[in-house]
């Protein structure tokens, strides 16, 4: 073994340096990531007054208050946002469509158009028209692919 180290000391040194850099890189990339809080083996979504609300409790409450449509809307948005990146083209199209929809609501409902628009958006599970249109475009693109 000692003859091997005497003949190949430089290769061993390079391997050790490479291993050291690899370990440092892995440590450095992971040191800023926060570990999620867990309670009873479940992920905690939020805490209020030292009471932990887990993911399953949150989804149960969401389902009770808004029904299955909210859960489906959140699921679709999460899938679309993870699958397709929001480009400037998608944003521009969404803003143009939003302007068109707003002008249509203004001509149809007059000064009370905002209330009707908010009501229509609430039925879809969104509060922002542009966000809804962006996710809608992403879902259409995802379906086409």
Image: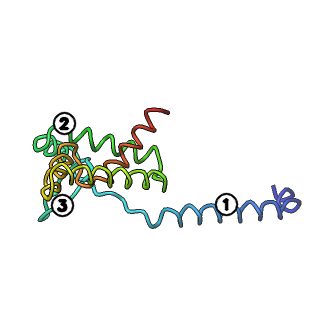
Secondary element at tag 2: helix
The answer to whether residue 144 is left or right of residue 36 is right
Q: x and y percent of residue 7 in the render?
A: 89, 60
Provide the residue designation for mark 3: 47
| Res 37 → quadrant | bottom left
Using the image, determine if residue 17 lies above or below residue 90.
below
Residue, x 50% and y 33% (percent of image)?
145
Q: Which mark is residue 19?
A: 1
Q: How far apart in space, not on screen, are marks 2 and 3 (Cα)? A: 24 Å
Secondary element at tag 3: strand
Tell which tag, 2 or 3, sits nearer the viewer.
2
Tell which tag, 2 or 1, sits nearer the viewer.
2
The residue most toward the right is 7
- For the residue pair 130 and 96, the one nearer the viewer reads as 96
* N-terminal-most mark, 2 or 3: 3
- For the residue pair 52 and 84, the one nearer the viewer reads as 84
Work out which quarter of the rendered image holds the N terminus and state it. bottom right
Provide the residue designation for mark 2: 68
Q: How is the image coloured?
A: rainbow
């Amino acid at each position: 073994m000692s003859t091997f180290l005497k003949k190949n000391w430089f290769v061993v040194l390079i391997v050790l340096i490479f291993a050291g850099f690899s370990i440092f890189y892995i440590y450095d990339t992971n040191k800023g990531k926060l570990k999620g809080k867990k309670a009873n083996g479940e992920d905690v979504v939020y805490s209020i007054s030292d009471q932990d609300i887990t993911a399953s409790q949150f989804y149960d409450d969401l389902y009770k208050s808004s029904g299955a449509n909210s859960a489906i809307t959140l699921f679709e948005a999460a899938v679309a946002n993870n699958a397709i990146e929001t480009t400037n083209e998608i944003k521009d199209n969404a803003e143009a469509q939003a302007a068109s929809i707003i002008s249509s609501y203004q001509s149809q409902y007059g000064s009370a158009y905002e209330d009707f628009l908010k009501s229509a958006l609430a039925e879809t599970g969104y509060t922002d028209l542009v966000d809804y249109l962006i996710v809608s475009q992403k879902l259409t693109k995802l379906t086409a692919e």
